[in-house]
Image (cartoon, rainbow, N blue to C red):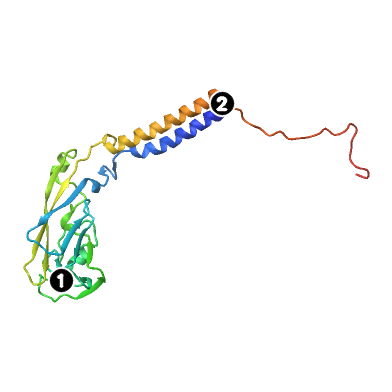
Amino acid sequence: MPSRTVRRLAVLGAATMAVLLPVASPASAHGGTPVSDQGFYETAITGAAAPLPGVSFRVDPRGEWLELTSTAQAEVVVLGYLGEPYLRVGPSGVEENTLSPTVKLNQALFTNAMPAGAPAGEHAPVWHRTSPKPSVRWHDHRIHWMSADRPPKVAADPAHRHLIGEWTVYVRSGTAQPVAVHGTLSWTGKPDNPLLSTGAIGGIVIVVGLFLVAVAVLVRMARRGRPVTVEAVDSEPEPAGAGPPPGG
């Protein structure tokens, strides 16, 4: 097989290993701490305890955000972790209560402490407008797993699906009583060995398949003996006895 073909195969092999090695690397770091499990938690909305006309909710399946959109004329208030007014959504847009302890707590992904602050209703809200649109999306600790450590049932059996628990967020429309919005948090299942996961296996099969196809093409080209064109340099021999010009 020509050396050029061998070099091409070596380059393709190196590229394939560069793709496969990150997939095959151990799924642990820092003394055995599992790689982030965030993609294996699933959050879903199951419904509200009472109808809220003109108000709709959406949630990120990974628990990154909860979203409220309102077309109602009455203002809708999202209650924080202490039951205090946290967000207010109305026809004029979105406002945030700057005195709400929930505002600061929601800036962190994980936390093991509830906010410290005044009970709901002790201080009047101080509203700060954050958007002119009647829709707000925020990070809410009530809808995702609050620790970097796995729940006990997940730690005992990470390969199968588990219902971790249910969550509730309260909202109030106008002067009516708060309405509970319910949802669930689940673990979708994660193989102990990442190479056993469907996505990893599919990726490896695709990469290896492409590599084998490329090898077959190059081998076929080599067997056909495709010519390599080399441009010749046109040079004429100097006449016999030719020397440097006079006076050189």
Q: Amino acid at mark 2?
A: Pro
Q: Up-down: is 139 above or below 35?
A: below
Residue 193 quadrant: top left
Q: Nearer the viewer, mark 1 or mark 2?
A: 1
Residue at the (21%, 66%) spot, across then down: 103
Residue 4 visible? The answer is yes
Q: Nearer the viewer, residue 32 or 22?
A: 22
Q: Quick one: SS at disc 1? A: loop
- Residue 12 horizontal/vertical position (percent): 46, 34
- Circle 2 packing at 10 Å, graded few (<14), some (14-19), many (20+), is few
Q: Is residue 176 left or right of residue 213?
A: left
Residue at mark 1 to residue at mark 2: CA–CA distance: 76 Å
Q: Nearer the viewer, residue 50 or 44?
A: 50
Of labels 1 and 2, earlier in sequence is 2
Q: Quick one: SS at disc 2? A: loop
In the rendered image, the quadrant that contains the N terminus is: top right
Q: How many marks?
A: 2
Q: Amino acid at mark 1?
A: Glu
Residue at the (22%, 68%) spot, across then down: 134
Question: Do residues under tags 1 and 2 come within 8 Å of each other at their CB atoms?
Answer: no
Residue that carries the numbered disc 2 in the rendered image:
2
Q: Is residue 26 left or right of residue 60?
A: right
Q: What number is the disc on residue 206? A: none
Residue that carries the numbered disc 1 in the rendered image:
75
